[in-house]
Amino acid sequence: MNVKMSLGRRAVLASLAAVALSAALPAQAAPTLLNVSYDVAREFYKDYNAAFGKHWKATAGEDLTLNQSHGGSSKQARAVIEGLDADVITMNQALDIDVVADKGLLAADWAKKLPHNAAPTTSVTVLMVRKGNPKGIKDWADLAKPGVSVVIPNPKVTGNGRYTYLAVYGSVLKAGGTPAQARELTQKVFANVPVFDGGGRAATTTFAQRQIGDALATFESEVQSIIEEFGKDFELVYPKSTVLAENPVAVVDKVVDKKGTRKQAEAYLKWLWSDEAQAIAVKHNLRPRNEKLLAQNARLFPKVNTFTVDEVFGGWRKAQAEHFNDGGIYDQISRRTPSAR
């Protein structure tokens, strides 16, 4: 009987010890994802993160901490290469994901892993001018006129700047012009740039707050936020033709496999194509891939003549090599352009 009592007491004590140990252990932290993204996407991903966090909790039963980092797209890609632990990268040009893939941090075929070459949204490069459009700016060629000043982010470090450069250059080719004519116009336009900022948001501040320039080259998705923040002293100009800016996304395989966050990261990107996420994109003036939503918001997203980097320049890798690498056409133009430094 004493043996039975002793065994029973031991069982109780063991149970109490297990409870005490469990209470003493800290609660397991929620998984954390870091989204490293381009400069002007911060507001979209702030709203998207809140919505996805609720979705993930409801469907997976798991809390998720979602962090975001924003800056000039090429600077962000370089930060990931240099060790910034991004679970996902969400850029405004495929090249900045390709360079990360080239370092072995993610799959070379990343663009095939999601629909639309892994780009859930698009935008177009447009011009913002001052109210009344006093310089009569209607197309890219107007930016080349003497006395006109245009603010463009630095094409060497920003996707926004590269898209603007390619929009100007490509508009000439699409109209039947020669590469020499395209180069001449682009050089004249960039000679009229007073300052090259390191990101799209900084360029907006230069134009709208510091009151520098007659026009700002930016993404269509930035227009409404400019008006909301700085007032209605601006007008939107759609050039006769412009470049389609595609916003690709990818999982950083090396990071998610190290952290054990692949499941969450893949779900995070896949949900960008959901109806709710596409509606959030519309709210932030990003053109959705959802055709029904796009049609319903035709007032926000008028039809414009666009061309893609693949169509006119043979893809981002070729465009980078010919135009933006050290010694490329942009550098050659810049050497003859006093302000382009």
Image: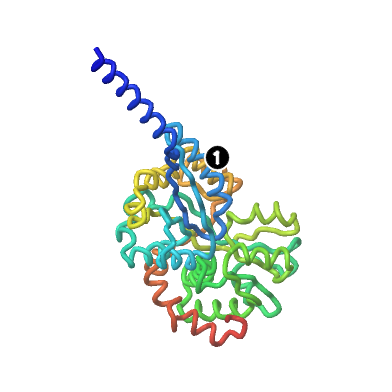
Amino acid at the residue labelled 1? Gln
Which residue is situated farthest in the top direction here? 1
Query: Relative to 42, is 59 on the left or the right?
Result: left
Whole-percent x, y for residue 217 in the image = 60, 66
Hey, which quadrant is residue 140 in on the image?
Answer: bottom right
Q: Residues within 10 Å of mark 1 (few under 14, many from 20)?
A: few
Tell me if residue 324 comes above or below residue 31 in the rendering.
below
Residue at x 52% of width, y 68% of height: 158
Whole-percent x, y for residue 10 in the image = 30, 24
| Residue 175 appears in the figure | no
Number of numbered labels in the structure image: 1
Quadrant the N terminus occupies: top left
Which residue position holds label 1?
A: 296
Residue at x 30% of width, y 22% of height: 11
Which residue is situated farthest in the front direction here? 2
Tell me if residue 15 comes above or below residue 135 in the rendering.
above
Hey, which quadrant is residue 334 in on the image?
Answer: bottom right
Residue at x 44% of width, y 38% of height: 27
Whole-percent x, y for residue 114 in the image = 35, 49
